[in-house]
Amino acid sequence: MKKPTISGFTFIRNGVDLCFPFEESIQSLLPLVEEFIVVVGQSSDETLDRIKKINNPKIRIIETVWNDAMIDRGFVYAQQKMIAQYACTSDWAFYLEGDEIIHENDISAIRQSVNKHHENPLVEALVFDYFHFYGNSSWIANSPAWYRRECRLIRNTIRSYAPDGQYWLVMSNHKKPRNPNAALANAYIYHYGWVRSNDAMQKKLDQVSRYWSNQTAPVIDYGNFDPKVLHAFQGTHPQVIKSWLEHFSEKNFRINPAYKLNSREKRHRILMKLEEIFNLDFSRKHFTIVVE
């Protein structure tokens, strides 16, 4: 059997200014893929130059100009994501966001999963488990509010599209779009978006909230958070992210003992208790597992 090929792809804009570990993200996936498509939106910082300096022949850059009038529920992210995906030429397409990292120890397992399911047309995508780091690199957030699994690898030979930057829908037989049919990748995505410094996170939210129906960005204080959602991280971090964590992650994270839960957090506490009692999972899923 011919080894299935994999393209990596992402999009980024003002990655330096908004403190994305986008260079580390790209580098973490390069060992797995035959090509890596990077869609770079017109930026006011040195994001484009930084990507060029990675200087890897697998990387292909596409420069774009964002439609800043597109403020409907993150659809501008979908546009940029699909520009990148449509440029992929491999059997499978691996989407990695600019604050997501692949652990070097998982590269072999991901390749094995692709090889295992490539000849099974029922499997349209592979689903990854998630570590959502919060506050600093020692803590992960785990509750129904944080998606525990998500598709990041999809067949590049089916009709799929993105409603926003996070997930895909599949079109088949001109019917209503549906979630991809998926199998488990048996690997993790390491998500570091919520460990950049508190000030950098506020700056990021202030800039991106306009693309979500012109919402007003919330005021971020990492310490105002439900401690029941946090769990100590017991694993090891990918080598490629360690320098970024040392220089750019939040250094003064502490839960505010006087913080009062809001109604959403109270609801999630109830759901977490039900999950514990009945072995359920109330987190949102944008896929249908068809093969274990």
Image (cartoon, helix red, strand yellow):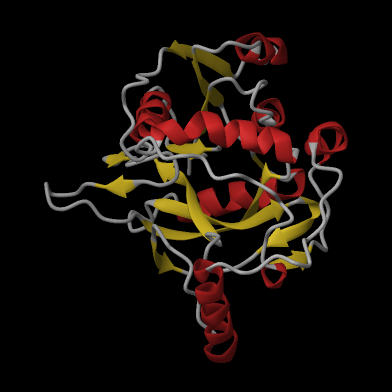
How many labels were placed on the picture?
A: 0
Q: Nearer the viewer, residue 96 or 104?
A: 96
Residue 102 placement, left or right of 268: right
Q: Nearer the viewer, residue 269 or 174?
A: 269
Q: Nearer the viewer, residue 141 or 84?
A: 141
Residue 254 placement, left or right of 228: right
Asked whether residue 267 is in view, the answer is yes
Which residue corresponds to the image point at 77% horizontal and 61% vertical from the top-left? 256
Percent from the top left, x then y, of residue 137?
A: 80, 50
Which residue corresponds to the image point at 72% horizontal and 41% vertical from the top-left? 198
Asked whether residue 144 is in view, the answer is no
Q: What residue occupies the far bottom of the structure in this picture?
A: 277
Residue 104 quadrant: top right
In the displayed structure, 99 sits above or below 15; it is below
Which residue corresponds to the image point at 43% horizontal and 25% vertical from the top-left? 84
Percent from the top left, x then y, of residue 85?
A: 40, 29
Residue 169 placement, left or right of 148: left
Which residue corresponds to the image point at 62% horizontal and 23% vertical from the top-left? 15
In the displayed structure, 118 sits above or below 212; it is below
Percent from the top left, x then y, of residue 90?
A: 44, 30
Percent from the top left, x then y, of residue 113?
A: 55, 54
Q: What residue occupies the far left of the structure in this picture?
A: 174
